Amino acid sequence: MDASSALAWCLPDEAAAWPPPHLEGVVPSLWAFEIANGLMVAERRGRIAASAITALIPALEDALAIEIDTEADVFSGVLPLAREYGLSVYDATYLELALRRFLPLLTLDRRLQQAAALAGVEVHPSVR
């Protein structure tokens, strides 16, 4: 599950419905930083209030059963995938995790969807 999916659930002007109960996922350690950054950018652009973010984080944590994966080898695993598929290192981190753990990938990012499909990873564009 990448940050684009979770942010779509969090932002009121996105069309994505709140995640279903008991949604489980494995995320790389950068996931929380990407969520925080996405929410901060949305706040600065007036898409969400700071008070809404404060209330949202515990609700998101309650809605998702997240396992944080810290096993990625950035230089021998992630960087080659970023090069091969023209991804940012951040996006390649999600692809590397899906490949290494034989997991499907939940993402709204079209470029990451395309790279995952080319790499043979099952892609779920959204959870409604």
Image (cartoon, grey):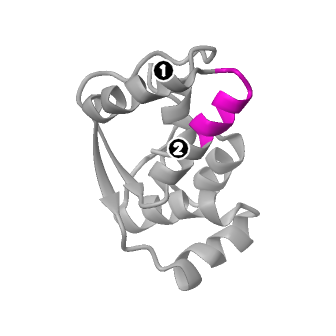
Q: Position of residue 121 (x, y in %)?
A: 50, 54
Determine whether label 2 and label 1 are within 8 Å by CB.
Answer: no
Identity, as a three-letter code, of the amino acid under mark 1: Ala
Q: Nearer the viewer, residue 76 or 46?
A: 46
Residue drawn at the location 31% of the way across and 31% of the way down? 58
Q: Position of residue 127 (x, y in %)?
A: 44, 26
Quarter holding the N terminus is top left
Residue drawn at the location 54% of the way across and 63% of the way down? 93
How packed mark 2 is, by other alpha carbons closer than 10 Å (few <14, some 14-19, many 20 or more), is some
Residue drawn at the location 51% of the way across and 57% of the way down? 94
Determine if residue 30 is in view: yes
Relative to residue 81, is residue 96 drawn left or right? left
Please identify the quarter of the rendering in which residue 68 is found.
Answer: bottom left
Which secondary structure type mostly characterizes the magenta part of the structure? helix
Q: Disc 1 designates what residue?
A: 52
- Image disc number at residue 15: none
Q: Nearer the viewer, residue 47 or 124?
A: 47
Q: Is residue 120 inside the magenta stretch?
A: no
Q: Position of residue 126 (x, y in %)?
A: 51, 28
Q: Earlier in the sequence, mark 2 or mark 1?
A: 2
4 over 72 or under it: above or below? above
Determine if residue 125 is in view: no
Q: Nearer the viewer, residue 26 or 124?
A: 26
The residue positioned farthest toward the bottom in the image shown: 76
Q: Is residue 39 inside the magenta stretch?
A: yes
Identity, as a three-letter code, of the amino acid under mark 2: Ala
What are the residue bounds of the magenta stretch? 38-47
Q: Position of residue 23 (x, y in %)?
A: 29, 32
Quarter holding the C terminus is top left
User: Alpha-carbon distance for marks 2 and 1?
Assistant: 13 Å
Q: Disc 2 designates what residue?
A: 36
